[in-house]
Image (cartoon, rainbow, N blue to C red):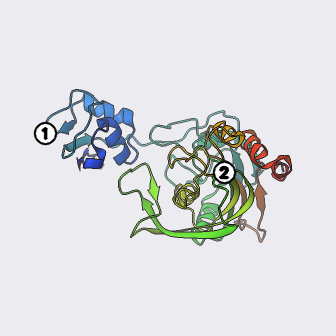
């Protein structure tokens, strides 16, 4: 049996990061490592600043500080069934299509050991494909925790392989609705970039890289109001946070996206009704509206749609009117 070895990571603090908390700095730069886990490492004196253990997790960093942290790999996760409410859109012996609510993580991971979509599915439909790691059975694509909408999960290894190949070939149709800042967005367009982890903030992704994977988002504007627009985004590729990043980096961030930032609109004042409506949205205004794929075991290409949830419908109605909101009630 192979032993699970501790890993030591080293960092040099740059001038732009001076003044940041030690635990926040390390958590942002270590994939899958929570701030609480960094804090535990500090308590165990597994973290050093300039070759000496810090007194506390909240110590403020200075430019030129040399950091090291030694962490053990996390214990392997394995998903278990949990009786969690879930809206199932379609179920057969090969696939299950669900309407994921905002706030639900798709599968267990560091910091989210249970309460996920996978935990719920194991209770409602039984065994899923073992084509992925034990903590994410059946998962061939994901939605961010605070993104709502439709998602397909494989129930057999054969279906998993076929669906994964479709996602890799970009033949799956995925359309999202997003409310973004800025009404002066063009009628339609395509954003194609090299894409990967942000070079400075590890929690973020970026489409402004010289090297990376190809990422492509097609979008069209459905409605406008003062300071805001309703857009439909079609994913050609499906990178992590892709729509959120592409829209933000094009100057039209998704409303209430805390990670990639919002900005005051240029054509609606801060006290306007439009901005008041946007402030009532407590998560990013992004919804996976439509999903279509070739069924793994017949010649059909089913398409599934998810009605926009109440919080996003209220935002759309406030900004663009009842008639626009009604278009997405089915």
| Residue 61 percent coordinates (x, y) | 25, 38
| Residue 327 percent coordinates (x, y) | 84, 53
| Residue 25 percent coordinates (x, y) | 32, 42
Q: Nearer the viewer, mark 1 or mark 2?
A: 2
Q: Earlier in the sequence, mark 1 or mark 2?
A: 1
Callout 1 secondary element: loop
Is residue 218 shown above or below 204? below
- The quarter of the displayed image where residue 95 is located: bottom right
Calculate the distance from the C-alpha at mark 1 to the C-alpha at mark 2. 51 Å
Q: Badge 2: few (under 14), some or many (20 or more) residues near its Cα, within 10 Å? A: many
- The quarter of the displayed image where residue 283 is located: top right
Is residue 305 shown above or below 219? above
Which residue is rendered at x = 42% and y = 68% of the image?
A: 212
Instruction: State left or right for residue 275 relative to residue 237.
Output: right
| Residue hosting label 1 | 51
Between 134 and 195, which is closer to the camera in this rendering? Answer: 195
Which residue is rendered at x = 40% and y = 56% of the image?
A: 198
| Residue hosting label 2 | 227
Between 67 and 137, which is closer to the camera in this rendering? Answer: 67
Callout 2 secondary element: loop
Between 77 and 303, which is closer to the camera in this rendering? Answer: 303
Which residue is rendered at x = 77% and y = 57% of the image?
A: 304
| Residue 44 percent coordinates (x, y) | 24, 29
Whether residues under marks 1 and 2 lie with C-beta atoms below 8 angstroms apart, the answer is no
Question: Is residue 159 visible from the viewing direction of this image?
Answer: yes
Is residue 55 shown above or below 18? above
């Amino acid at each position: 049996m192979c032993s699970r070895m501790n890993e030591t990571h080293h960092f040099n603090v740059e001038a732009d990061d001076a003044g940041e908390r030690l635990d926040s700095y390390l958590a942002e730069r270590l994939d899958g490592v929570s701030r609480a886990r960094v804090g535990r490492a500090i308590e165990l004196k597994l973290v050093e600043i300039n070759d000496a253990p810090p007194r506390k997790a909240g110590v403020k960093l200075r430019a030129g500080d040399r950091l090291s942290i030694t962490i053990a790999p996390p214990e392997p996760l394995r998903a278990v069934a949990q009786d969690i409410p879930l809206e199932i859109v379609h179920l057969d012996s090969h696939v299950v299509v669900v309407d994921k609510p905002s706030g639900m993580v798709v599968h267990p991971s560091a910091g989210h050991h249970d309460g996920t979509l996978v935990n719920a599915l194991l209770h409602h439909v039984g065994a899923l494909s073992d084509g992925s790691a034990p903590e994410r059975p059946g998962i061939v694509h994901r939605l961010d925790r605070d993104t709502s909408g439709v998602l397909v999960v494989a129930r057999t290894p054969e279906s998993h392989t076929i669906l994964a190949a479709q996602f890799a070939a970009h033949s799956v149709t995925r359309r999202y609705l997003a409310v973004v800042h800025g009404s002066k967005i063009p009628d339609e367009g395509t954003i194609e970039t090299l894409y990967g982890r942000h070079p400075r903030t590890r929690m973020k992704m970026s489409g402004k890289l010289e090297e990376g994977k190809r990422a492509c988002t097609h979008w069209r504007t459905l409605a406008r109001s003062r300071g805001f627009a309703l857009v439909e985004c079609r994913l050609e590729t499906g990178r992590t946070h892709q729509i959120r990043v592409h829209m933000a980096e094009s100057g039209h961030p998704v409303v209430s996206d805390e990670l990639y930032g919002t900005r005051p609109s240029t054509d609606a004042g801060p006290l306007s009704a439009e901005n008041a409506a946007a402030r009532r949205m407590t998560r990013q205004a992004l919804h996976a509206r439509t999903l279509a794929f070739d069924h793994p075991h017949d010649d059909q290409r089913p398409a599934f749609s998810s009605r926009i949830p109440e919080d996003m419908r209220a935002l759309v109605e406030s900004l663009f009117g009842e008639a626009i909101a009604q278009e997405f009630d089915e």
